[in-house]
Amino acid sequence: MKKLDVITIGRSSVDLYGAQIGGRLEDMASFNKYIGGSPTNMACGTARLGLKSALITRVGDEHMGRFIREQLLAEGVDVRGVVTDPERLTALVLLGVRDQEQFPLIFYRENCADMALCEDDIDPEFIADARCVTVTGTHLSHPRTRAAVLKALKLARENGAKTALDIDYRPNLWGLSGHGDGENRFIASDKVTKELQATLHLFDLIVGTEEEFHIAGGTTDTLEALENVRVTSNATLVCKRGPMGAVAFTGKIGASLDDGISGPGFPVEVFNVLGAGDGFMSGLLKGWLTDQDWETSLKYANACGAFAVSRHGCTPAYPSWEELQFFFERGIKNPSLRHDAELEQIHWSTNRMGDWPEMRVFAFDHRMQLEDLADEVGVSRDRIGPFKELCLRSVRDVAGDKSGYGILCEPRLGRDALYAAAGTGLWIGRPVELPGSRPLRLEIGPDIGSKLAEWPVEHVVKVLCFYHPDDDAAMKEDQEETIKRLADGARANRLEFLLEIIPSKVAACDDQTTAKIIERFYEIGVYPDWWKLEPMKSDAAWRHACDMISRHDPYCRGIVVLGLEAPEAELVASFEVAAKHDMVKGFAVGRTIFAGVARDWLAGNIDDQTAVTQMAEKYRALCTTWDAARKKSGGAA
């Protein structure tokens, strides 16, 4: 059995996508960073659809190369074929959306890493592990990359794998036009036609737009071009026709494009045509490699292309398999798919990066409590920042290189610790509430979107709200509006959102209280990635809360249990109840770990290492307690 469904080969870049829509690239002031390059997009697009995908390319030995590798891993793409080039930079693309038809773009590919791909980068054992090898036209444009592609195709055919070509014709990448002509999709060239036709016999599937078949077939008459390709290749030919869908020819080319096999189309608003072909190819490969008929394969392809033209970015726009099935079952409600709230929620929640089946979080985001403590022992509040750095050290001592550990920290008092946690593999939550405020007020102020735009995307927006179902109407409206704006701001900035609710500090609670609060927030359109809940003592209370989340958001990341400075014995008891429920992923506890240590350290009674050791011991004990509770309940820890 082969371990991989498809290996794609070729370009890999960082796309810097203009955030402003409807203007010239010259007038775009900020950019969103995504992975790009057709083979890279396809590897991710097929992985999202459930195929076991891999990529062969080169990236630079620098930040952008690491970004591509990390994103591929997060998407579930096998990166054994991604070579780090010590001499060349990762390719960049600057691009934007001017209107439905114009998409200015500049390729920064002078001696870039992926164009240094060579035959030595093609591992025969790796190729032998795949059911299909898919290549794109750009890497047939240079003798070195062409040799690498031809070696991979030869090995694939020798091992009984399928082969596919996305013509992906970019004239300026073949040296036919200047740097400012990246938008151009067709310039006739006998040389390019000859180079392409010399390889067409090597493929089982060839895919292109009408213009791309024009270059492959050597004529601007589409049917004649298809006939010319058929002379040199027995491949199934799939011709993309834009809003008219696509047609497949498995044998003879008919008298009309309408004679080909077609699949259902999806009439959606065109927002951004960049990357639509790679989305289309991802869906087509999903159908083809799972032995669907061509009508079904084209249905998948057309739908994935529809998603791509409806959203910003290339890879970020592509659907998950769950999202695609939902789309097929429910149909189009809003032709502007990016404005379909139900669909966008599924898109977001089924394409999040990373996996956190267990959560052991040390919460040292406290501000008011530590400020009061510093005042009480008579030391400067400036000492709080260094103490939070010790908290981080204790987490890293316990976590080591293991996954499933995290912190809650904030930048006002704990900036250095927060910054030091970047890239460590820890889950990082960051609070935004004004401590103790009710009604809820945000420490980041009212301009939520611009403030969150400054955050790294690995940070999770965390907010604590003292909310109870029996609150009066004015209090509810005020707090709900704040949380709604915050949730929207987090999503707009591609940040996960954790909602912490504490009703017990407001009024009496029963087994239904928390579930009622959860239901209310879903009713107003707030879908937290994470919930942080009180350590409820009743199994019924946990069951009602978990059921409510599952009913409204089956893709929710889960729940973490907060501590409320409870004694360790009480936390142990609450863990044993909570751990029975799969929706509860772990804990986020703070004062139980650091309260006594903070007092001693701030007062000068213990040194740094003693503080770190004591907190690490308490934190490790809680981790052990949680893991034992989970194991006892039959969970995964």
Image (spheres, rainbow, N blue to C red):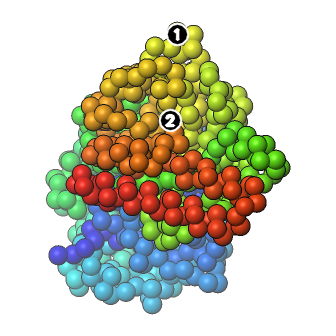
Q: Is residue 238 left or right of residue 64?
A: left
Mark 2 neighbour density, 10 Å: few (under 14) some (14–19) many (20 or more): many
> Element type at marker 1?
loop
468 shown above or below 292: above
> Residue at left 50%, top 80%?
83
Instruction: Report the residue marked by disc 1.
Output: 472
Q: Give residue 194's position: percent from left, percent from top.
A: 44, 75
Residue 500 marker: 2
Q: Give residue 421's position: percent from left, percent from top.
A: 62, 61
Mark 2–mark 1 Cα distance, whole angstroms, equals 20 Å
Q: In which quarter of the view is residue 480 placed? A: top right
Q: In which quarter of the view is residue 223 placed? A: bottom left
Q: Give residue 304's position: percent from left, percent from top.
A: 36, 47
* Nearer the observer, 16 or 564: 564
490 shown above or below 473: below
426 shown above or below 6: above
Q: Quadrant of the N terminus?
A: bottom left
> Residue at left 48%, top 71%?
401
Q: Give residue 559's position: percent from left, percent from top.
A: 40, 42
Residue 130 in view in this figure: yes
> Element type at marker 2?
strand
* Nearer the observer, 466 or 112: 466
* Nearer the observer, 503 or 94: 503
Mark 1 neighbour density, 10 Å: few (under 14) some (14–19) many (20 or more): few
> Residue at left 46%, top 39%?
532
> Residue at left 32%, top 26%?
511
Amino acid type shown at disc 2: Glu
- N-term-proximal mark, 2 vs 1: 1
Q: Residue furthest top?
A: 473
Q: Quadrant of the C terminus?
A: bottom left
Amino acid type shown at disc 1: Asp
* Nearer the observer, 466 or 188: 466
